[in-house]
Image (cartoon, coloured by chain):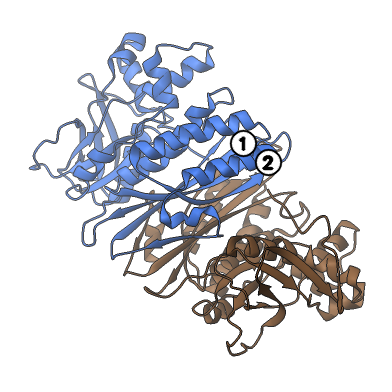
Chain colours: A brown, B blue
Amino acid sequence: MSGEADLLRRLRAMAQAPAARGLADDVALLPTLGQQLILTTDTLAEGVHYRADDPPETVGWKLAAVNLSDLAAKGAAPVACLLNYALSGDAGWDEAFLDGMARALRSFGMPLIGGDTVALPAGAPRMLSLTALGEVPEGQRVPSRAGARPGDRLFVSGPVGDAGAGLALLMDGATEPPELIRAYRVPMPHLTLGQSLAPGAHAMMDVSDGLLIDAARMAEASDCAIEIDHVPLSEAYAALRGESVEARLAAATAGDDYVLLAALAPQQEPIRGLIEVGRCKEGEGLSLRLNGRSVPLPARLGYEHG
Amino acid sequence: MSGEADLLRRLRAMAQAPAARGLADDVALLPTLGQQLILTTDTLAEGVHYRADDPPETVGWKLAAVNLSDLAAKGAAPVACLLNYALSGDAGWDEAFLDGMARALRSFGMPLIGGDTVALPAGAPRMLSLTALGEVPEGQRVPSRAGARPGDRLFVSGPVGDAGAGLALLMDGATEPPELIRAYRVPMPHLTLGQSLAPGAHAMMDVSDGLLIDAARMAEASDCAIEIDHVPLSEAYAALRGESVEARLAAATAGDDYVLLAALAPQQEPIRGLIEVGRCKEGEGLSLRLNGRSVPLPARLGYEHG
């Protein structure tokens, strides 16, 4: 039990925002001022969304980052979060997890204001949920997946495939190159870019399950067709796997990228940090051109959850 | 996978509020108007917070009810909720769970606006989390656990011990009396009463871990002493266990009551539905008088989580 007491003390020390009421009450209290609240929640399950041997600091970071990435895709500024934590009986793991999560929360300015801890039954895999709140000023558009229009240009906010390559390396027992391992374990939410893009984007979402599957989802929600004609790769990825059509297909169907995917009007000025990957057209469905030639869609477009 | 597709369709059908964006986006969007938002989150773990053989409808109801009870204790009106759901591979269980949760959400007017589903690893116990948002008008006091003052009278909003007796009966293989089983499986959040009480209560919380332990927490947070001199029992409880000091102690140390515990100024007019159980005094700690005599505190005051 002292592990639990330590953990609760640690959580209280993290929860300094007035809204948290010191985690001493059963609820958090958040005054509002007419802003639009953006709410999202994501769960990481051991063995599903992270590897049991991932360093716990990185699991804590990742739990915050995947939620922040959803806020980023709506142009929201982080406001606060609530944690559902299952105590695993391993106090060292719990503490390191909280260290990593606290680092992410500090980095991106999202105070912890509440949560719940339960005892994980013995032998059960860990399940960790975070619910994040962000805000967008009153009257500002909040882009959804729907809203892309024929003629729109499609952009991502970074190369894809690094995290998938990192996971594949870990599964093979490799621990480098560090850039790729890090992409899998320590994703970076693109909050600032998201805030710049959101007011003008016709549609925006984060790429969490793979560029192709998420672009297909945007096409379907927007009732238009999308052609992807470029899959941007990092130098580390290209050095490992090359830049063939196959390498690009693997990158475009891997999950955990957490880059933004935005549909912008054709006349919109270029925004620094964006890479053009395709365009929206009349019709429906997804089509693919890679390295200058038309490529049939793979059977598996990305990661289908849970 | 068709179980998952069915479940997602079902969740979408439940999420009709505009804030949900049809569950087709990655986030929910909630306009605000200057109200105070009350946030709470609670997890139910199989084998810890409910029995694996509890009917899934009742588990769904209970998950909503325990969160609503926290809103009730702050006088909040339910606004919306987000669900973290772990698919168990048992589509019938999942569907019945959602039926029960949907019934509670409809009964108390708390629309589902978002969430996350993950696949539960094989053999893992279920873990289900709900994050609830409520609102309190701008400027209205939101009572916390702290704030009780010497001289305050202490009230609960119903008898205690029924749920604990129901659990004990289930553990012995009994399935009646139905009132007690039902108290354990289908708790009722006291929302209307909470809304009447909150603006004037010096301190308020819900009794989830046992009257004695929760009163001790209120005393500690409020920096005062609390004397409990009455433990109200239901007719069903008294018929089963009698009204002895021992029976009252068992009722006051059982969890899952979900009645409200409120500290009110001595001059405050009586409010219908409240039962006086004690008072706040100068000093610290908890003391107990039952059936007219002073009773030493039991070693275990209630349920200590996780």
Does residue B133 show up?
yes
Residue A75, placed above or below residue B154: below
Are there few (<14), some (14-19), or many (20+) residues within 10 Å of tag 2?
A: many
- Disc 1: host chain: B
Q: A109 and B247: which one is in front?
A: A109
Does residue A15 show up?
no
Residue B223 percent location from the top left of the image: 28, 50
- Disc 2: host chain: B
Residue A93 percent location from the top left of the image: 68, 54
The type of residue carrying mark 2 is: Leu
Quick check: A171 left or right of B304? right
- Is label 1 in contact with label 2 (beta carbons under 8 Å)? yes
Residue on which the image places disc 1: B126
Quarter-of-image position of residue B69: top left
Q: What element carries label 1?
A: loop
| Residue occupying the far bottom of the picture | A269
Residue B117 percent location from the top left of the image: 61, 47
Quadrant of the image containing the N terminus of chain A:
top right
Question: How many angstroms separate mark 1 from mark 2 (CA)?
Answer: 7 Å
Residue on which the image places disc 2: B120
